[in-house]
Image: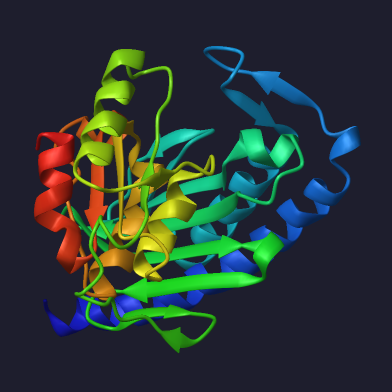
Amino acid sequence: MTSHVVSGLEGRLALAETMAREAGAVALDYFKNRETLVVETKRDPQDVVSVADREVEVLIRTRIAEAYPDDGVLGEEYGLDKGRSGFTWAIDPIDGTSPFVNGMPNWCVSIGLIHQGEPVVGVISAPCHDELYAAALGLGARLNGKTLSLDASRTIRNAVTGIGANNHVKPSEVARIVENLLEEGGNFIRNGSGALMLAYVAAGRLVGYYEPYMHAWDCLAGYCLVKEAGGWFLPFPVDGDGLTKGAPVLAAAPGAIDDLKRVARI
């Protein structure tokens, strides 16, 4: 990677951390006062959005436009604005809106950045847990400033795997994934936020995460975190209009890669 990209990463990583803290504080205030929150449904009753999601995304977009006006931005609520710099941000203002509106702490602010199709910055703020995950390509991954490094001895049989599902995936497919994982001697959790579970993979709390259909704004920040912590991820198809469509998402610690590929049939 060229030096000007690396220097750009350092500045953009600092911006992402600042934005994540600011956005996380705004979202946390809404969370604490959620009885007054206006909530709408999207494509089905389980797919919800709130005024908090929209305000947080506008905040992040504004900060990016002020600092890097030529960067592209893809957000869950307001779509894709193509840029001219070669950098595109992928942001989910509140990943885990369902836990958020139902009073559970399993939600986060996810801010990712790609360059030439590769995740190069990933910052995830989990305000209820006072945690900030941050990574950039070649600069390592950290949780609240502490370096993250995955343990290769952890496998699906001695650790826990995260699984995600939504209405894009057939119930029979979800059942097959769970059955495959259990038959391999593994176990699973689902906490309602794919981005947060990817951060947990980077932190070594989960040994892997699989979801058959996920969007770029949900996974690219987590992918960068996992890679910089020493893990592996299934590349997300960003060419053409792939960036705005869903795709399978799989990330794993070193000792779980082959097993989880088999579970996912990838």
Where is residue 31 drawn, in percent x and y? Answer: 79, 47
Q: Is residue 4 left or right of residue 44?
A: left
The one of 248 and 138 positioned closer to us in this rendering:
248
Q: Is residue 250 left or right of residue 44?
A: left
Number of numbered discs on residues: 0
The one of 220 and 263 positioned closer to us in this rendering:
263
Q: Residue at x 60, y 61 (%)?
A: 126
The one of 53 and 104 positioned closer to us in this rendering:
104
Figure colour scheme: rainbow
Q: Name above or below for residue 39 compared with residue 142.
A: above
Where is residue 39 drawn, in percent x and y? Answer: 75, 25
Q: Is residue 116 visible?
A: no
Q: Quadrant of the C terminus?
A: top left
Q: Residue at x 62, y 46 (%)?
A: 58
Q: Quadrant of the N terminus?
A: bottom left
The one of 175 and 94 positioned closer to us in this rendering:
175
Q: Name above or below for residue 137 compared with residue 207.
A: below
Where is residue 34 drawn, in percent x and y? Answer: 84, 40
Q: Residue at x 88, y 45 (%)?
A: 33
Q: Is residue 228 left or right of residue 44?
A: left
Q: Residue at x 19, y 75 (%)?
A: 152
Q: Is residue 98 visible?
A: yes
Q: Quadrant of residue 227?
A: bottom left
Q: Name above or below for residue 23 compared with residue 216.
A: below
Where is residue 27 drawn, in percent x and y? Answer: 72, 52
Q: Quadrant of residue 6?
A: bottom left
